Amino acid sequence: MTAVSNGRFSFAITKILSLLYVALCLTIVLPAMATAQVTDKGNPYQGMDVSDETLVSELKGFKSGFAEVNGTRLHYVEGGQGTPVILLPGWPETWWAFHKIMPALAKNYHVYAVDIRGMGASDKPAGGYEKKNMAKDIAELIKSLGYQKAHIVGHDIGSHIAYPLAALYPDVTLSTTYLDVAGLPDAVLDFRLIPEKVTSGEFRDSFFLWWFAFNQVRGMPEELIEGRAHILQDWFWNALLYKQDALTKRDRAVYANAYNTKDAIRGGNGWYQTYTQDLIDNRTYPEKINVPSLGIGGLGNGLLVDFMNKRINNPQLVHIEESGHYVAEEAPEKVTRYLLDFFRSVETK
């Protein structure tokens, strides 16, 4: 073999070895990069079955249903017999927010826990998130289910829907119950968005509603939160729950899974992005609403009482002091008892 041949042979061997080295590096680096990405956006509840099918199967006598109303498709979970009770959850939850009280209510009523427009298995259209329009969703749902009237129970965003429902559709609203939040008050225009003093970082140290502004932003939250909903939600559970064990790891998995996609994040943020129009609409409703109304307060009791006394005739008000924002999950026995007593009082008048 000549010197030239030896040189070519050595070059070829060197090139082959180089390619093998690169291939080896890629087999190590690429999986590591993939692992880093999964860790970054990873779901700590990976592998947990939180499908609606499984969740509903755990509630004896309940089943899922769908209805086409007001140009959108709503998902609900129903069970029981009798006068209908419509349960409307808020952000960042789903129909599952009421799973602790649904079985007890279903012993006397036909219970419907609804994924409102933009939530869970319901449609997530580009628009229509004005609460006036979402109230129309529920009014049409009640009619489509074959009822004339129903008891309405709202929490958080669900309460923002319940208020215009009572104002605009009193003919279908047998009663309205607001859990920790009533209708959207004009006071939100003056809510603090930054703390007035240096704080420890704890939410209760200086109350400010930063997410009201964050959720107004279009496009960016979807990019930031997709696959990371549990990070955002953990902040709210830690800040707004009085009883931290009121939500199990599985409960948290249900909600993280429900808001982990861009469409779900966009749908939920849509409820906030209509707040300006909601306030305008609220000012057009009757000064005082005459529908029988109950308020069950927790962390937000002060605002709840103020709104209901101003906007509703003769409201009934109770305060569960050892509860945060999520009263149906933190104090289900008390909430159930208050609801049943209230429903009976309305029905016997």
Image: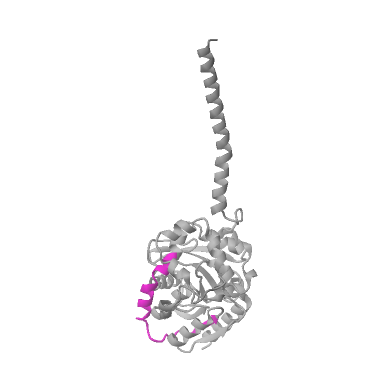
Q: Residue at x 47, y 87 (%)?
A: 309
Vertical placement of 1 versus 32: above or below?
above
Q: Is residue 233 left or right of residue 147?
A: right
Vertical placement of 116 versus 342: above or below?
above
Dividing the picture into quadrants, the one containing residue 34 is top right
Please state which of residues 135 and 222 is positioned toward the viewer in this rendering: 222
Residue farthest along the front direction in this orientation: 3
Q: Residue at x 56, y 58 (%)?
A: 51
Judge whether residue 98 can be spotted in this image: no
Please state which of residues 61 and 96 is positioned toward the viewer in this rendering: 96
Dividing the picture into quadrants, the one containing residue 279 is bottom left
Answer whether residue 187 is magenta in the image.
Answer: no
Dividing the picture into quadrants, the one containing residue 20 is top right
Q: How many marks?
A: 0
Q: Position of residue 332 (x, y in %)?
A: 61, 75
Please state which of residues 43 and 98 is positioned toward the viewer in this rendering: 43
Magenta part of the chain = 269-296
Q: Residue at x 57, y 42 (%)?
A: 31
Residue farthest along the right direction in this orientation: 245
Q: Position of residue 2 (x, y in %)?
A: 53, 10
Vertical placement of 59 versus 344: above or below?
above
In which quadrant of the rendered image does the N terminus lie?
top right
Q: Position of residue 76 (x, y in %)?
A: 50, 66
Judge whether residue 299 can be spotted in this image: yes
Residue farthest along the top direction in this orientation: 1
Q: Position of residue 115 (x, y in %)?
A: 49, 66
